[in-house]
Structures are given as C-alpha cells and as structure tokens.
Image (tube, rainbow, N blue to C red):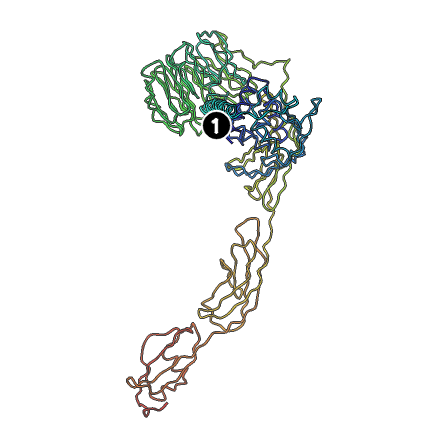
Amino acid sequence: MVLKTLVITIKIVRMEVTMNKLPEKLVLLRKHANLSQGDIASRLNVPVTEYMQWENGNSICSVVLLKRMADMFGITVDDLVDNTKSIVIPEPAIEQSATIPFNGGQDINATQMYDGSLRDTMQTQQFSSLNDKNDQDDDGHTRVMNTSDLSNVEEKDASHSYDDEDEEEEVKPKKKKKPASPIKKKQTMIIIGAVAAIVVVIAVVLLLFNKSGSSLNVGNDNRIALGDTYSLYVDNQGNIKKYGNFSSTENFSTGVQVAAFDDHAAALLKNGTVISSDGNADVKEWKHIKYIAAGKDHTVGVTAEGTVVCAGNESACKVSEWKNISSVYAGNGFTLGLTNDGAIKASGSNTDAVSNQSNVRHISISDNLIALTKKDGKVTIYPIGSAESLDTGSWTDIQSAAVGNNLVVGLKKDGTVNISYGDEEVVNKVSSWKSIKHVAANGSTVIGIDSYGKMHGAGDNTYKQYVDTTEDDTNKQEETLGEVKNIKVDVTTANVVIKWDTVENASYYEVSVNTDPESKTKTSSNSTSIATSSLTDGQSYTVTVVAKSDDDKVKESSATHTFTYTAKTVQLATPSGITANTTDDGWTIQWTAVDHATSYKLSIDGGQEFEVTGTSYTDTGIDADGTHVVSVKACSTDPTYTESEAGTANLQYVTKTINVALYYLNGQQYLYNTSVSVKVGLTYSWEDLDRLAGSYAASQGWTVNSGSEHVYSSTNTINIQVTPTNAPVEGQQ
C-alpha cells in the first residue's frame, strides 16, 4: 500500500511536467454520472471553486482526494493520473428523478439514481495502456479491456516505476539473462533501497506540502479591493486585474485574494505567501496564509492554523495571542479579527465600540466608518472619531457590506445592492444593479462585480478606478436558460410531489414554496421533481421553480405555479372484535386494534363519547344487569387519516357475586355460622347483611356489631362478629 501511494505521488509529479489529461478525465466522468461540479465538490467536502480549478487544469488535488474520486467513479487512481491511459465511457441512461422533502430549514434527504459509484455502469469502459502489452495491438491501436481485468491492472500499475527506459523495454524482445552473482544482487538491493528512500522523502514532502494548505484556489473572499486611486479584482482564473492608478514594487499579476486601504495593497498568492505594494520583507516571509487584510500602514494575515501574523504599525499588530481566527480586517492604526464563532478580536485604536460584538459574519472598514454585517443579515454602522453614522436599520438579508467615507453598500443574498448615501444619482444607479457577487467602496466610489465577471461602478472615477459595464452592449448577447414549463402538483396521501419539464443546459433547479417560513431547496443535479409534506389542507400556495447553470455566463430562468392544497385522506377501518367481561373492578370492554389509529372514541348506551388510548376500557360505575350497547370509533392524530365509522356491539352485563360468611362467636368459641350472597364491587351495610340472611340473625336474638360499611371483592373473606342475646345451646349450628 505504501509503495502504491509512492508510485501514485511520482505519477502526479510526472503529470505536472507533462501534458495533464486529468481535467478532461474529470469532466468526462462527471458528465457520465450526470453530476454538477457542485455535486462532486459536496461529495469530496471541498469548495466548488477548488474543484473547478482541477477541471480547468489550474491545480491538482491531493493524493487523498484523488483516491476518493477514483473510488467514487469505480476506477483506479492510475486511471486518473496516468496520462498514457484514456477513459472512454458510453453514454449513460440514467433517469432524472429525485424525491427531496423540504420543510423550511430542514436538511434535504435526496434519493438519487446515482449512488456515488459507477462500478455497475462502467462495465464497458475502454482503456489504453502502454504498461500492459496485452492492452495494445502491435499497430498501436487501443484494445478494449474487460472490467474483470481491472484488479490485475491495479497491481501492475501500482508496482510500475514509469521510467522512460521501462517504456522502451516493453516493446523490445526480452533476452534470457544469466543469473546474477550474489555480489551483484547485493549491489542491486542497495541501489533499490536508496531509490526507495529518496522516493519516500519526496512523497512525504509532497504530502506535507499539500496538507499545509499551500496550494490555494480562488474563492469568494477578497475578490475585489478599492484604494484611493485604483481597484484590484481577481478573476476566476486567478489573474489580478488592475484599474486606475496603481503602482507597486511587487508583481500583482496573479493571486487568490487582494486587499487595499488608501494607497496600500496586498495580495495572497496561490502558494500561501503574501506580497504587499510597499515590498515589505517581513510579509514576504509568511507561509501558509489563508486570509489577508491591508491597513493604512500594516498588512495582516491569517494562517492555516487560525493564528494571525502582522507587519507594520506596532499598535495595530498586537495580534500574536489571537487564535481560532477565520478572517481579518485592517484600518488606520487598528486590526479586527473575526473568530470562527463570530466574535471580534481587536488591536490598536478606534476599536472600543466593536470589540465586544458577537454573531458577526463580515466587517468593512474605511477612514470614517466600520460596518458589521451580522449573521442575521442586519448591518450596523460605527463611526470613527467625529464621523456621522448611516441608517441601515431597514436592511435585511445582507451577505456583506462595504463602507466609504460617507456611504455604505450592502450586498444581498439575491445579488441586489442596498446603499445609504447622500448622492441621489449614485443611489439610483447602485440600486439598479443585479446579480452582484462582490462589492467594494472607498471615499465616494462604489464598485461591484456581477456573476458574469462584469464590473459595475458609481461615484467618483477620477483615476478610472472602474470601467462601467452597465450600459447596453448591442454586440453582446447573454445566454439565458429556457423557461421552466409545465409545473405540475401531484397530491398523494403522504405528501405533495412537484414536477416540471427538463430545461436544456440547466445544471440544477431551486424550488421554493411560500410557506411560513418559506420552504426553499436546491435539487440534486438536474432532477425535475421534489416532494414536500409541510402544507396545510385548504391553503393556497405559489411554487417557484428556477432553472440554474453552473456556468456564470448563463442567466437563470424561472416560472411560478399557484394551487390550492387539498389533502388526500384515508378513512380508518371500523373497529371490530368488541367484547366484554365482568371483573372484580367492574365491566371491561375490549376490541381489536385498528392500523394507524392513535386513540378511540367510546360510548355506552348512547351516552356521551369519551376518548380512550389503548384497546380496552373498564367501567367501574355500571350498576344495571342486562344488555348494553357499546360503540367504538378509531381516531388518528395524523391528518392523513380520518375518523372511522362506529363499530357497535350488544353486550350482556351480569354482576359477579360471592358468598360472605357470618359467624356467631361466644368468646373465642365457634358456635354457629351462616352465609349471604353479595355482588362484587357494591357496598353493603350491616343491616343489608342481616336482610340478606333472611333475618335469621334477628330471629335468633343476635345483634350485629355496629361499624362501617363494606365493599366486597372476590379476593377477600370477611368475618363478621355478632353478639347473641339468647345464646343457643353450645354446639348448636
């Protein structure tokens, strides 16, 4: 296994210096699986932008992730990284369907035709290999490899050294070799051991280099920066575009993040290092940085471990003790750090007002203002010095904000922009922006970049800090997905299934229902159905289906459908098997359980219904022997099921009786006894017992001792003492 990992690592190195075929293989495999780039990224637990870099050929993932992708597609790592191998996959016939319940904020539970493995659908894969003479005809044409031979290929490829000499030897006839001498064998083993040691060192270095986070990709953080006289923007390919009057001793040509404050700028490079516009030597020494910020006279970086490094202003750079930091922000003489849980760390001046804030998502700083975007989508403005605050109290759903000297812009989740500023012309222009992904502000200038990479600008443009692309371009026709058509709603007893027709070139769909709160979900891949069970019977709803593309240059389309939800229900079965029997406690009625019933309604002799849980009920108050009419209905708390018809039965009730003994005692001597019959559960007085005994006791001159009344059960034996006035002859019964 170790040897195989080392060989794979060497192949990755060779792939980087030769023609890299990994991107086209990834695209081919993904399309065969009918998955989007986002689906693959989600399965690998990496940002989608990182995966896009792999398909674009701008970076190569780690050995660990290559192994996971190979397992996902049911192939070997060699099949991915070996440029001498090609993958030809037949067009799949995969049904596009998924069932995804969505109840406002709950996790999506999708059932997909694709289960993450292509082992069953890739039985006819074709491979070409220069490492197996059986895989290629003499004329160089590719042969078809049976999937049964894959295991053999794995073993052979894993042990192959991939030297050029080996490849040449594959096509030469092999000559018989004389047995090597013991000395030569020993020399050979030493050489092999030395080479293996070198390989181990190289592999370890490569793996550590990869784990350190030193290969970064363009993300959504710090894609745009605005200084006094310039702007910087990182495009999807990692190129830094510069506008306006920007000068630096460093080469700001490529990177993954940019930051600016007044005339000071910084850039985070792909290898995790940082450059600053002033050429600061300390900044150049930083390694493994994942997030940057530029203040007026200092540069700040967050390391892969969540600690912070800083160079420049001494007061602002007291950050060495900070831990668990996700992002940093810099101003004039101070630094703010945002922890993983949304708390703020502060160093330097002008930080008292914000240092104790929590639940913060994003921070923006200018010479006059600090804007905190909270996790609830609200924005709060804190003035610096004598500056005046700005009103953002009505803003909602804000992802991030940017502040200038007397203005603030807020980027909403839907790509629109809020702005608070005194210049009406600028406000009207910015308020019309759509599909915005990034915003920045400085002084009286505002810029934004939309999802198509186009720049938008408003306000001061003295130094050509922005190129306004919002004006109509008659030569440019943006592609728009076709309209979502034929939205249908199928109601079942369990839920509602929403279906629509497939939109050509759509990567996925977003479906929302105007429940309270709104239910919204993203379909898996390009599935064209979802299900929900959170609707209320008799209420009207509006369904909105939006077709979306992974291509930023393709605009989305949408359609709506309004319907009134009428729940389909099933009536519960009528209860049966109704019986009863007399017990010591009274009269117990029983019946057979009904499927899906959670309770029952019971009535006796047409009386008022009462609820019973379980399948039996004991009546302790019944006092009339004879026939009684018992009625039972099944009920359920599940709205899918309605109350059943009543099941009825005519049941006989006869009170249970027992004999109670009466004893005459003369002192401790037993003289006489008799017995009376009593009904179980009823109460009898002493006089009742005398009456039931046929007044025998009175005729004999006996006096029953006074005392409390008694309730009899079948388990107790009652000895009742009576006192004679005229005692019979001893021994008489």
In the displayed structure image, the side of residue 659 where residue 666 appears, left or right = left
Position of the C terminus by quadrant: bottom left
Which x, y percent locates residue 725?
30, 88
Q: Is residue 588 above or below residue 241?
A: below
Which x, y percent locates residue 395?
46, 25
Q: Which residue is mark 1?
A: 397
The furthest residue to the right? 139
Q: Is residue 547 above or below residue 330?
A: below
Q: Residue at x 44, y 75 (%)?
A: 679
Classify residue 342 by image quadrant.
top left
Q: Nearer the viewer, residue 683 or 494?
A: 494
Q: Nearer the viewer, residue 38 or 509?
A: 38
Q: Hey, what amino acid is under mark 1?
A: Asp
Which x, y percent locates residue 402?
44, 19
Classify residue 385 by image quadrant.
top left
Secondary structure category for the residue under label 1 = loop
Q: Is residue 643 above or below residue 538?
A: below
Q: Residue at x 70, y 25 (%)?
A: 137
Badge 1: few (under 14), some or many (20 or more) residues near its Cα, within 10 Å?
some
Q: Nearer the viewer, residue 220 or 137?
A: 137
The furthest residue to the bottom? 729
The furthest residue to the left? 667
Which x, y percent locates residue 420?
45, 19
